[in-house]
Amino acid sequence: AEGRESAGQEESCGSKMVYKVTDDKPEVYKLVTASFHTIGEWREDPTDDPESPHWNVLWSWSSKPKVNRADLNIWQRVNHYPGAFELTRKDALKRNLAYCKSLFKPDRSVYKLFDVMPRTYALPQEYVQFCNAFSEGITFEKQDPGKKTRPRINYGSDNTWIMKPVCSSRGRGIFLINSIEEVEYGEAFVIQKYVDKPLLIHRHKFDLRLYVLVTCFNPLEAWLYREGFARFCQVPYSTEKEDLKDKFVHLTNSSVQKVSFAFSAANRQYGRQSGLPRNAFG
């Protein structure tokens, strides 16, 4: 054991730190290795053994890297914590926030720290609860008493919900609905009350991408990176029924927006004329 520790320390404390990237996702491997090379002072571990004592950082796309965390040396770090899906899966995050809220009374200030998610239901198990919540936004238009017609259902412009696969990313499988007949799923989904009046910049929806490095959960130790960036939708925001299916209006995901027509040279020029940040258009 002492020999292994000395060898690992000698390797890790050399002129360069050592990283290892699993190659289960070629695009991730290329991106991460390029980032390490850009930073400098890092070199790649040439061995194929993830339990090698020579690396300082193991970067894995999978949340379950093939490494025994109990055997890690003090100079070794892995980019995934055990059970991280409790925060990254949408249904698990919803469940855990609800649990934390249940520990405190609504009038307590700490309760508001966990009251950060719109009304959310996990499908299919909470379909009935969702239907009850959806029906709260339905009204019936009055009809002429002399006409024998059914009252017209008014779903309401503010009764819009957004459906998301629980463990997908990059905007895949997300869509908006404002009619109960539009609820479709063949896998686990969450459905959330849509924030229909978001903060806009020049009539465009956006979000902020910030990065936090959590080095310890107990006690909690987290580091906020100084820089971040904004992601913009390419089409002005609208909640009109004909625009609910337009992902370029509602989804800020870069993987979605990069294929928008607004990435043409002409629309980049429009972005500059309208005052939108240039990075909003690529």
Image (cartoon, rainbow, N blue to C red):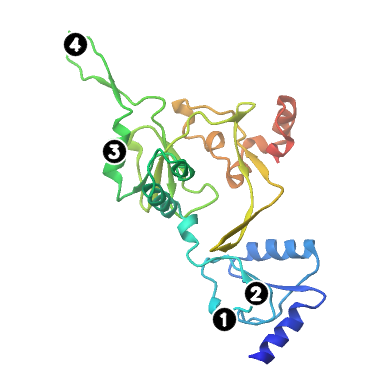
| Residue 168 location (% of width, % of height) | 48, 53
Q: Amino acid at mark 4?
A: Lys
Gap between marks 2 and 1 measured at Cα: 10 Å
Q: Earlier in the sequence, mark 3 or mark 4?
A: 3
Do callouts 3 and 4 mark residues in contact (Cβ within 8 Å)? Answer: no
Relative to residue 150, is residue 217 depicted above or below? below
Q: CA distance from mark 4 to mark 2?
A: 77 Å
Q: Quadrant of residue 220?
A: bottom right
Give the residue at mark 2: 76
Position of residue 1 measured from the top left corner of the image (x, y, whole percent): 63, 90
Circle nearer the N terminus (4, 2): 2
| Element class at badge 1 | helix
Picture residue at 34% right of the left edge, 33% below the top: 179
Residue 167 or residue 112, whichever sits in front:
112
Residue shown at the point (37%, 53%) measured from the top left: 188
Residue on which the image places disc 3: 131
How many residues crowd around disc 2 within 10 Å: few (fewer than 14), some, or many (20 or more)? some
On the image, numbered disc 4 is attached to which residue?
Answer: 147
Q: Residue type at mark 3?
A: Cys
Please state which of residues 136 and 104 is positioned toward the viewer in this rendering: 104
Q: Is residue 244 above or below residue 124?
A: above
How far is mark 2 from mark 3, CA to CA?
A: 49 Å
Q: Give whichever of discs 2 and 3 has the lower sequence position.
A: 2
Mark 2: which amino acid?
Gln
The kind of secondary structure element at disc 2 is loop
Seen in the picture, residue 231 relative to 143 is either above or below; the reply is below
Task: Tell me which residue sits at (35%, 37%) in the image.
Answer: 182
Q: The residue under label 1 is which amino acid type?
A: Asp
